[in-house]
Amino acid sequence: MDAELKAVELHEVPELKMEDALKMEVKDDALKDEDEMKMKDDALKDEDEMKMKDEALKDGGDEAELKDADVTEDLDQEQQEKEPMTGGRRPSDAPPAGGAAAAAAEKNGSVKLKIPEEAPEEVKFTGLSKEELLRVAGTPGWVRTRWTLLLLFWLGWLGMLLGAVLIILQAPRCRDLPVTSWWNHGPLYQIGSVQAFTDGQDLKGLEQKVDALSQLKVKGVLLGPLHVAPPDEAVSLRFEEISPEVGNLEQFRGFVQTAHRKGISVVLDLTPNYQGTSGPWFSNVSVTNVAERLKSALVFWLDEGVDGVQLSGVERVSTIVPSLWADIRAIVQNGTEQRPEERVLIGTTDWSSVEDVSSLLSSTGVDLLISRVLRPGDPDAAERAQSVQRLYSSHSLTRLAWSVGGRTQGHLASLVGPALVKLHQLLLLTLPGTPVFNYGDEVGLMDEDTKFPKMLWDSDDALNETRQEDRDERLSRLTFFRSVSELRGKERSLLFGDFLLLANSSSSMAYLRVWDQSARYLAAFNWAEEATLLQLSDETLPQQAEVVLSTDSSLLPAGGSVELSSLQLGPGQAALLRFPYAG
């Protein structure tokens, strides 16, 4: 610093005496030598640091980082040596060249050295060694801690186990599902005339209508009879031959295969004298012979893939030839290695008395018995409700079948009137048992001059106003039928729930369908031509219920809520309500 000040003074005071200048020059040389000595010492220190770094590299240090540091330091040192000793002045401030004092001033100055800062060593935690862990683990504090944690773990585990056991013991036990068969899971659809049902008027045309049947959610088709049977001629009866008017065996096989792919079973009606007037089994003299011939026909058709057989007049054959009837039952109902699937035996009767129908159901042993218990046009709704109640109390609902009309009686709309078609659709689809419908009942098909009217298949063709209204009404019935049928197939309460009669009068009825913890369904009906008020009250009923659907959505819209103590039904109206299980 003194040298710098003196150099400055030489520049500023040129009149200094030569002797003093020489003294200053000597001092400057001494300072310069001292600086050079310091630089040599720094160089020696750098060499020592380089040796230490080389040794560190040999011990596993990061060679790349040390090399970078050395290169940086060398570059800094070379740069410092090249810089002129300007005595701390900037180049722009230096005096012009010339004169000894100026040269001496340029040679003297301070040297700036960049000393890199040493990065702090990164401390890495390596954990305790095995020996250290063993020493710590044996201390009394850790032993107590481990035992405490182990005890807490087992206490917690036992607590959860005890809680689970208590929940299981206190929770209501789920009710075992009843043993059911395929015919208990959806409606059966009767096609008594292939020619009337299809546009093609044969079994090939019937195959083309399987998709339409699938949309109805039907589980089985009751087909025929199709076999050759001249009226009242037992001798000419040929069970195993399809009448040429409806098709051939190959077409029949195609229909069965297509129906099976859609989950629809096929039941074949083999009533012997289905076109005659002397009874379904001809005369009493011929019953034995016909029943014997039927046995081999049953084996034939079951081998062709049918899922069951329907027979009319079972009260006659089961009483006249009971042994042959037992053989018929065994062939159909007993599975074999070739036919392990369940086959249904359906009987039909014209009887309508509850007592007679109940007795026949027990004596014949059929899986389902279609009767006339629900007499169409019966003015007394109270008697209808009592009939249902008595049959339900006497038999398993898996053996009950309900229908209004049929192959020999006619269609639903003709028997009850078009205005009550939806009401009876809802009734049949919500009673405990299997509903059976005649073809066209889903759209309100009317009988005209025959019990086998032409099926109405609606298209998108333009119609006049009257025909358009008729088509809209048919589509409304069809939509309603599909909705209820689909709901029945999903809800356990409707499939095999208990039946509880809530209200019953000469013109109205209400009942409840419940199963275990499933949603409850309440069906209410009014057959009268005027509105009625149902005041429903029971310990199992809530105050309100949700409207699932109704035959007149303007009065009871779906999704709305109604008071069960004052349920208003319009003329000829029916509704299906729902409320949850309350525990």
Image: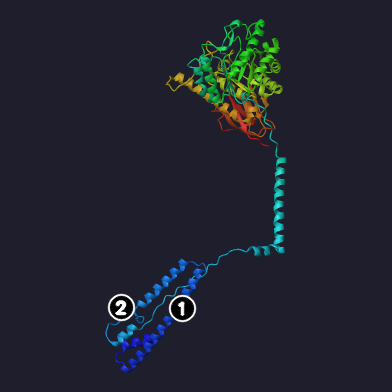
Query: What amino acid type is highlighted by mark number 1?
Result: Lys
Dot 2, crowdedness within 10 Å: few (<14), some or many (≥20)?
A: few
As rendered, which of 250 and 427 lies closer to the eye? 250
As rendered, which of 507 and 193 lies closer to the eye? 193
In-image side of 574 versus 360 (left or right): left
Q: Is residue 40 above or below residue 474?
A: below
Q: Give the total number of marks visible in the rendering.
A: 2
Residue annotated with mark 2: 92
Query: What amino acid type is highlighted by mark number 2?
Result: Ser
Q: Can you give x and y, in whole percent of width and height, for residue 168 in the image?
A: 70, 41
Question: The C terminus is located in which quarter?
Answer: top right
Q: Is residue 121 above or below residue 288?
A: below
How is the protein colored in the picture?
A: rainbow
| Kind of element beneath mark 2 | helix
As rendered, which of 24 and 395 lies closer to the eye? 24
Q: Quadrant of residue 515?
A: top right
Q: Quadrant of residue 313?
A: top right
| Kind of element beneath mark 1 | helix
Which residue is located at x 67 percent, y 11 percent? Answer: 317
Dot 1, crowdedness within 10 Å: few (<14), some or many (≥20)?
A: few
Residue annotated with mark 1: 45
Residue 150 — which label?
Answer: none
Of labels 2 and 1, earlier in sequence is 1
In the image, which is nearer the foreground, mark 2 or mark 1? 1
